[in-house]
Image: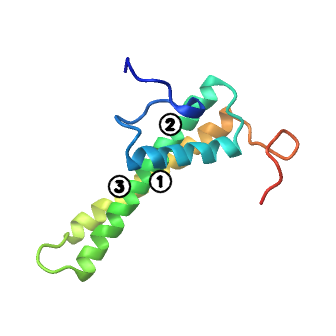
Amino acid sequence: MSGRRALRAGKQRMLPDHRTVAGKQYHAYYTALAAQFDLSGPLGRLEASRTALRHLRWHEAAAALREAEAARRNGKGRRPSAMRIRSLIKIEQREDMKLTAALAALERLAPRRSALNGGGWPS
């Protein structure tokens, strides 16, 4: 990935192009994690980048499932089969489990911010 400048906030390059909609969502998820966790170390920033990517993948899987369910319910002509809907449900559940595991790994590596260590008061 030579020739590319570093991303803001210490994020790792996890996508081919971070200027896309997915890249902007990735940035939003990463900054939300940075607000909650102390990402002062490189390992914490790497894990936060991985967690933000997992959140993006889960969001994409959930959107695909919603679209397929809507097409099956309201669509005319070719619609997703019941087997395809079940497959999308499994994919969404698997992505959710991966996101949960990534959040747990991040919590082990980077402590949560609190009012005492610079996190501010909860809104």
SS under mark 2: helix
Asked if labels 3 and 1 touch by Cβ distance under 8 angstroms, the answer is: no
> Can you tell which of label 2 and label 1 is closer to the viewer?
2
Identity of the residue drawn at 57% across and 37% down: 48
Q: Earlier in the sequence, mark 2 or mark 3?
A: 2
SS under mark 3: helix
Q: Earlier in the sequence, mark 2 or mark 1?
A: 2
* Picture coordinates of residue 18, whole percent (x, y): 41, 38
Q: Earlier in the sequence, mark 1 or mark 3?
A: 3
Q: Quadrant of residue 20?
A: top left
Label 2 to label 1: alpha-carbon separation: 14 Å
User: Foreground: 75 or 16?
Assistant: 16
Asked if labels 1 and 2 touch by Cβ distance under 8 angstroms, the answer is: no
* Picture coordinates of residue 91, whole percent (x, y): 35, 55
Crowding at dot 1, Cα within 10 Å, few <14 / some 14-19 / many 20+, comes out as: some
Which colour scheme appears in the figure? rainbow
Residue 82 drawn above or below residue 36:
below
* Picture coordinates of residue 15, whole percent (x, y): 38, 36
Residue closest to the far top:
2
Residue 34 drawn above or below residue 121:
above
The residue that label 3 is drawn on is 91
The residue that label 1 is drawn on is 96
Specify whether 44 is left or right of 20: right
Q: Amino acid under label 2? A: Arg
Asked if labels 3 and 2 touch by Cβ distance under 8 angstroms, the answer is: no
The disc placed on residue 50 is: 2
Q: Amino acid under label 1? A: Asp
Number of marks in picture: 3
Q: Amino acid under label 3? A: Ile
Specify whether 112 is left or right of 9: right
Identity of the residue drawn at 27% across and 81% down: 73
